[in-house]
Image: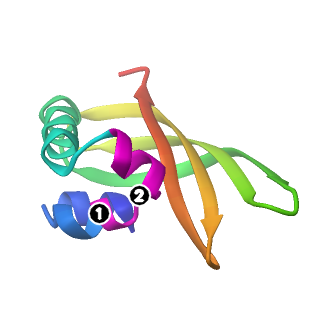
C-alpha cells in the first residue's frame, strides 16, 4: 500500500500509486520532501481505521473519498483521501493529513 511504501522509503513505488493528475501537479522530488516532512512530525505509519467512505461514478470515471484515523509512531492524525479508478486500478488523487 501507499503508506507501507512510504514507510519503507520506497518512494518510487509510492509515487507510482498516485494518479497522473497528482504526479503532474507535484514532481517526485517535491512529493518526497513533503512525505519526509510528514514523517518527521508523525513518525512511521502503524495502522489506520476507516471512518467513512463515499463512492460516485458516471460513464467517464469512478471516484471514492475516504476518511481514516491513522496511528503513527509519534502520534495520530486524520487522513482524508480521494481515489480515482483508472484502467481498473484505484489511484490516489489527493491525501491530506490533519489534526496532528
Residue 76 position by quadrant: top left
Confirm whether the magenta stretch covers residue 59: no
Magenta region, residue range = 15-25
- Which residue was labeled with disc 1? 14
For the image, the number of numbered tags is 2
Determine the residue positioned at 40% across, 55% down. 47
Question: Which one is nearer the viewer's eye here, 44 or 15?
Answer: 15
- Which residue was labeled with disc 2? 18
In this view, the mark in front (2 or 1): 2
Determine the residue positioned at 59% across, 54% down. 83
Determine the residue positioned at 13% across, 38% down. 33
Whether residue 6 is situated above or below residue 42 in the rendered picture: below
**Mark 2 → mark 1, Cα distance in angstroms:** 7 Å
Whether residue 71 is situated above or below residue 2 in the rendered picture: above
**Marks 2 & 1, CB-CB < 8 Å contact:** yes
Residue 60 position by quadrant: bottom right
- Residue 8: x, y in percent? 16, 66
Element marked by disc 1: helix
Question: Which one is nearer the viewer's eye here, 30 or 99?
Answer: 30
Question: Which one is nearer the viewer's eye here, 29 or 83?
Answer: 29
Q: Is residue 62 left or right of residue 99?
A: right
- Residue 20: x, y in percent? 44, 57
- Residue 32: x, y in percent? 16, 46
Question: Which one is nearer the viewer's eye here, 21 or 66?
Answer: 21
Q: Main secondary structure of the magenta part?
A: helix
Determine the residue positioned at 15% across, 32% down. 37
Amino acid at each position: 500500500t501507499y503508506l507501507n511504501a512510504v514507510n519503507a522509503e520506497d518512494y518510487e513505488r509510492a509515487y507510482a500509486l498516485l494518479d497522473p493528475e497528482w504526479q503532474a501537479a507535484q514532481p517526485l522530488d517535491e512529493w518526497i520532501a513533503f512525505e519526509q516532512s510528514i514523517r518527521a512530525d508523525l513518525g512511521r505509519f502503524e495502522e489506520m481505521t476507516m471512518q467513512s467512505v463515499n463512492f460516485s461514478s458516471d460513464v467517464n470515471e469512478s471516484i471514492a473519498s475516504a476518511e481514516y484515523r491513522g496511528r503513527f509512531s509519534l502520534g495520530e492524525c486524520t487522513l482524508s483521501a480521494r481515489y480515482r479508478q483508472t484502467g481498473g486500478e484505484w489511484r490516489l488523487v489527493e491525501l491530506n493529513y490533519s489534526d496532528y
